[in-house]
Image (cartoon, rainbow, N blue to C red):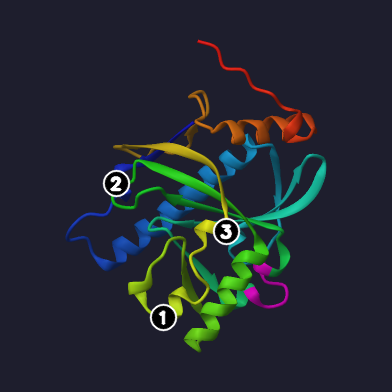
Amino acid sequence: MTAYFPSSLMPTAGETKANRQANRRELRNRMREHGKAVVEANGYKVGEALGLERGRAYHAKRNGKSLKIGFRAGADRWIAATSSALDAGGELTEVDEIFVVTFKDPKVRDAIEVYRFKTSVIVDAANKVFAASGKTGQQWIPLDDAKDMGVHSMAGGSLGKHGEVISTVDVVWKDGDVGGADVTAPLKLTLDQAKAGLAAQFGVSKDAIHITIEG
């Protein structure tokens, strides 16, 4: 699988604040769409949206089990959490799993990683960050250690170590309004990821999957 993004969404020197913010929003939207493609390639069937604020949560099925999933995207390996999402009826109280789509290296931007988290992990971190900041509204939570970004930002620790990278996808930047994922290209997986995907597809335990590589 390869993810294609228009080169116009790459950050450039001298761009206005309005353009930069608009490009970031569009880039995050496209990253979430790629995340959905990866999730479906890993045995999930993504259904109707839950109808929550911002439309980032969906009904889904995996191994015949119904669940609710949400998506986050962060080009710089930080993800947003809002106090409203933590309130009763908010996204973080409604979904079972959260998938986070981010660039593997924000400076190079030649690959994206898709993390899977239990929602409780993000809720716990978000609550700690909000408590440390003493503010409501929106806070940012790092996937990696970022101790130089302020005490409250790291109050919940780095999230990445509590999630599972289910796929890494190559990124190609092209001129024009491109989008979508090339699903004909081979998906790069570890053996453990391949076993998990096959187990989900056939409804068996991962321990029942044996892979032989020849050549």
Residue type, label 1: Val
Horizontal and vertical percent for residue 158? 48, 65
Rendering quarter of residue 28: bottom left
Callout 2–callout 3 Cβ contact below 8 Å: no
What secondary structure is marked by label 3?
helix
Tell me which numbered mark, 2 or 3, is placed earlier along the sequence: 2
* Distance (Cα) linking label 2 and label 1: 27 Å
Drawn side of residue 70 relative to residue 160, left or right: right
Residue type, label 3: His
Q: Residue, x 78% and y 35% (percent of image)?
A: 205
Drawn side of residue 165 relative to residue 93, left or right: left
Residue marked by disc 1:
151
Q: Neighbour class for label 3 at 10 Å: few (<14), some, many (≥20)? A: some
Q: Residue, x 47% and y 46% (percent of image)?
A: 113
Rendering quarter of residue 77: bottom left
Residue marked by disc 3:
162
Question: Eyeballing the image, is 29 above or below 120?
Answer: above
What secondary structure is marked by label 1?
loop
Callout 1–callout 3 Cβ contact below 8 Å: no
* Distance (Cα) linking label 1 and label 3: 20 Å
Q: Residue, x 49% and y 67% (percent of image)?
A: 80
Residue type, label 2: Val
Callout 2–callout 1 Cβ contact below 8 Å: no
Horizontal and vertical percent for residue 192? 61, 35
Q: Which of 122 and 17 is in front in this view?
A: 122
Q: Nearer the viewer, residue 134 or 154?
A: 154
Q: Which of 138 and 9 is in front in this view?
A: 138
Horizontal and vertical percent for residue 47? 72, 46
Residue marked by disc 2:
108
